[in-house]
Image: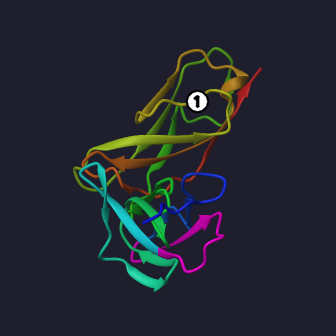
Amino acid sequence: MTALWWPGSDKPKAKLRADNTAVPVGGSVTLTCSVNPSSSSGWKYCWYKEKYGVPVRLQDAIFLSNDQISVSEGGLYWCRGKSRRYSEYSQFVRIDTIVPIRPVVTLYPNWSEIYRGETITVRCEIHGGDTEWDYEWETNSRIKAPNQNEYRIRSASSSNSGNYRCKGRMKSSQHKTTEWSDSVTLTVSR
C-alpha cells in the first residue's frame, strides 16, 4: 500500500472553536471543529476531553452535526479530523463551568478618592460554603493584581487607578469558576 500524501505539509491541522468559554448554570457551549487545508472532502470529526492529563475520546457530548457538539461541563477539549487518515489534534479549548456565586470587591479604606502615598487594600470576598478558591483579577490599571484574595497597595500612585473585578476558581476543580464580581473603581489623586 502506498503512503498517502498531503500537499504542503505532513498532516492538515484541526481547528477548534467555542461559541463561549464558560458554561452558564444549566446551559451548554457549542464546539465547532474544522480542518485546514480542507482539500479533502468527507471529513469526520473525533472529539476528546482531558482525563488524567491526556485526551480521551468523548462519549457523553450531544452531537449536533458532524462538525459540532454541545458540552455542558468544564474541561479541556480537543478535536481532529479523519478522512483518509487523521489530521493533527487541534489546540485545546478550556471550558469553565460557572457556579452561581458572585464575589464582591471592596476597598479599604472605602473612600471615593485616594491620595498618592496612601495604603489601600483591594479585597475579593466570596461568600457561600467552605470551598477553597484561587483568585483571578481583571483590571485596566497599569499594575497587575496578584492572584490572591487581597491586593495591598503600600504607596498608591496614579498607575493604580482603574477598575478592579475578580472571580474565584475552585482549588478542588480547576474548571469551575464563580461569575465575575461587579467592578470597583479606584481613583488615586495626584
**154 sits left or right of 173 in the view:** right
What colouring method underlies this structural image?
rainbow
**135 sits left or right of 107 in the view:** left
- Residue 27 within the segment the image draws in magenta: yes
Residue shown at 68%/19% (left/top)? 157
Foreground pick, 68 / 115: 68
Residue range highlighted in magenta: 25-44
Residue type beneath disc 1: Lys
146 over 61 or under it: above or below: above
Residue shown at 63%/20% (left/top)? 156
Percent position (x, y) of residue 111? 61, 34
30 over 155 or under it: above or below: below
Q: Residue furthest right?
A: 190
Secondary element at image label 1: loop
Q: Is residue 158 visible?
A: yes
Residue wearing tag 1: 144
**187 sits left or right of 103 in the view:** right
Quarter occupied by residue 70: bottom left
84 over 187 or under it: above or below: below
